Image: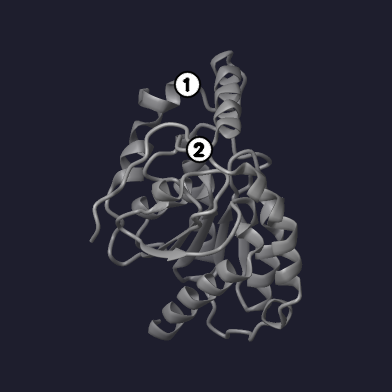
Amino acid sequence: MSEPVVARGGTNLALRGELRCGWELARLAADPQFLRPRRRTNAPPVLLVPGFMAGDQSLAVLRGWLRRRGSTTASAGMWLNIDCAERAVRAIEIRLRRLAEQFDKRVAIIGQSRGGELARAVAVRNPGTVETLVMLGSPVLDPLSVGPAVLRAVRSVARLGDLGISGLFSTKCADGPCCAAFREDLMAPIPEKVRTLAVYSRSDGIVSWRACLDPWAEHVEVASSHIGMSCNREVFGAISEILDENEEER
């Protein structure tokens, strides 16, 4: 298992590359395997967690495709992913357990960007409930290894949280006791029974791809923008492959 390569702090990234997300969606929409995927009879239920400053609707394309291939899906219940990480993880755990109990089987959890960080902590805490973890462009090795524009947005949300506005993370979440358990789980070994995939792109214009190389996960490189990972044909292929392999083993 490789040692983690940590990139600390903000970094200069080609944000203009994110403009191709529209092309990625168009390319996906033209793929017959997206429109009419083979329906799996034993597809796992899937819980979806959106990225920073995004809500459940940002994963609508991915959710529709998963349903067409046979999975029941559930959302994280987020209007915007800007809450304290520990509070967010606990709320996601409730939805995870509800979904697992409904179908009496382990669940796949897919998170984009910050959503993958939250999903990782959930998987570490619930290995008996999570079968598969997929992180899409999630800088788990250093959550602040992001472009300047994103870093400014993080700091703006934190300042509002410091003012006491509810439902927002604050600067205390970075090193205070409120998110201490989350920070530990973000770097903890992922239990062997949880099959884990970290998807990254070297042309990611939002986060440093090196920060996405979780040493406890399988790595898959794709040609994708950061925003477009939830509607990229290569990403969907990687997700399909890991879900199908687990279905065969089940």
Instruction: Please state which of residues 200 and 164 is positioned toward the viewer in this rendering.
Output: 200
Residue found at the far top of this picture: 163
Q: Does residue 163 sit above or below 142 in this rendering? A: above
The circle drawn on residue 106 is none
Among the 4 quarters of the image, the one containing residue 83: top right
Residue drawn at the location 65% of the way across and 43% of the way down: 54
Q: Does residue 120 sit above or below 177 in this rendering? A: below
Instruction: Please state which of residues 173 and 232 is positioned toward the viewer in this rendering.
Output: 232
Residue 76 visible from this viewpoint? yes
Quadrant housing the N terminus: bottom left
Which amino acid, mark 1? Answer: Thr
In the structure shown, which secondary structural element does the residue marked by tag 2 occupy?
Answer: loop
Query: Alpha-carbon distance for marks 1 and 2?
Result: 17 Å
Quadrant housing the C terminus: bottom left
In the structure shown, which secondary structural element does the residue marked by tag 1 occupy?
Answer: loop
Rendering coords of residue 62 (x, y %): 65, 64
Contact between marks 1 and 2 (CB within 8 A): the answer is: no
Instruction: Please state which of residues 9 and 163 is positioned toward the viewer in this rendering.
Output: 9
Q: Is residue 19 left or right of residue 87?
A: right
Rendering coords of residue 4 (x, y %): 28, 49
The mark lying in front, picked from 1 and 2, is: 2
Residue drawn at the location 53% of the way across and 27% of the way down: 169
Rendering coords of residue 162 (x, y %): 54, 16
What residue is shown with label 2?
146
Q: Is residue 40 left or right of residue 119?
A: right
Q: How many marks?
A: 2
What residue is shown with label 1?
171
Rendering coords of residue 23 (x, y %): 74, 62
First in sequence: mark 1 vs mark 2:
2
10 Å crowding of disc 2: few (<14), some (14-19), many (20+): many
